[in-house]
Amino acid sequence: MDKDLENTKVVLDVVCGKWKAVILLKLFDGTLRFGEIKKSIPLINHQTLIKQLRELEEDHLISKKSYPVVPPWVEYSLTKYGRSLKPLLNEMVAWGEKHNNKDKTPS
Amino acid sequence: MDKDLENTKVVLDVVCGKWKAVILLKLFDGTLRFGEIKKSIPLINHQTLIKQLRELEEDHLISKKSYPVVPPWVEYSLTKYGRSLKPLLNEMVAWGEKHNNKDKTPS
DNA sequence: CAGGATCCCACAGGATACTG
DNA sequence: CAGTATCCTGTGGGATCCTG
């Protein structure tokens, strides 16, 4: 039967957003504010970031902490569940490094 | 700068098709004919399988070998590049197994 | 048996404007 | 600063029909 199918689907559902893997990687270095994440991923659209964060939160990979101050102060951090993805994400980065042959052997 | 972003993107571009990870996993067990893959993933749509296979081929993760006989005999196998994904896919399956809590602790 | 040619639709990602 | 609320568009996955 198809354990493989189910197992991979669980993972893909969770990390296959266009920016999710990167966001998670950023958070491995520690809690970050919304603006910090945004600054660390300049290409991402403001709204898109919000959506990806919300999805990650709904999947319980990250947790959000809002402080009722003005201006707003919102922190994102990995949950234990999210941290469990570390080996996987590391593998991804490792593979990417090895095979990112966009400009092979540049001068 | 954003090595993480690039590296994860390379990976995601390649394995984030809805069925790609499973297909690759099947092929780790050896070369398979089109029909065998299809049978091993009954839920997948015929056309969709063809498309996913073509994409995997274009990404050089698998290679296709057609024998000009009738009825057609077409074999798919992993390239060396494709096989290099093994650790990553294993991590995916491992993570999925651990966290596939759809029906936790069944009777 | 494997796959080409179409058509279709949901939806993820993004753009813009507004708010406390 | 962080977040809603809309609206829009490209496209990935699928359904249907046809072919050597």
Image (cartoon, coloured by chain):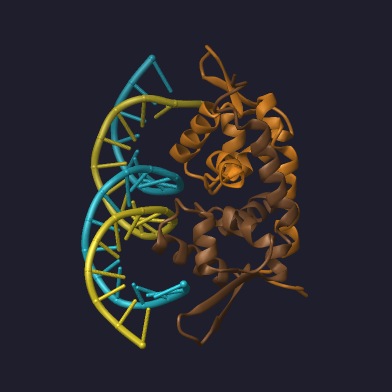
Chain colours: A brown, B orange, C yellow, D cyan
* Place of residue A95 in the rendered image (x, y in percent of width and height, measured from the top left): 68, 38
Query: Which quadrant of the structure image shows residue B64?
Result: top right
* Place of residue D3 in the rendered image (x, y in percent of width and height, measured from the top left): 43, 76
Residue at the top extreme?
A: B68
Q: Is the residue C6 above or below the residue A43 in the image?
A: above
Q: Is the residue A9 above or below the residue A82 in the image?
A: above
Query: Which quadrant of the structure image shows residue B96?
Result: bottom right
**Identity of the residue drawn at 52% across and 11% down:** B68
Q: Is the residue A106 above or below the residue C14 in the image?
A: above
**Identity of the residue drawn at 47% across and 53% down:** A42
* Place of residue B100 in the rendered image (x, y in percent of width and height, measured from the top left): 69, 64
Number of numbered discs overlaid on the protein picture: 0
Q: Is residue B100 visible?
A: no
Q: Is the residue A23 above or below the residue D1 in the image?
A: above
From the viewer's side, name the closer residue of B24 and B73. Answer: B24
**Identity of the residue drawn at 49% across and 51% down:** A18
Q: Is residue A24 visible?
A: yes
**Image quarter (top left, top right, bottom left or bottom right) of the C terminus of chain A:** top right
From the viewer's side, name the closer residue of C1 and C17. Answer: C17
* Place of residue A24 in the rendered image (x, y in percent of width and height, measured from the top left): 62, 59
From the viewer's side, name the closer residue of B30 and A40. Answer: A40
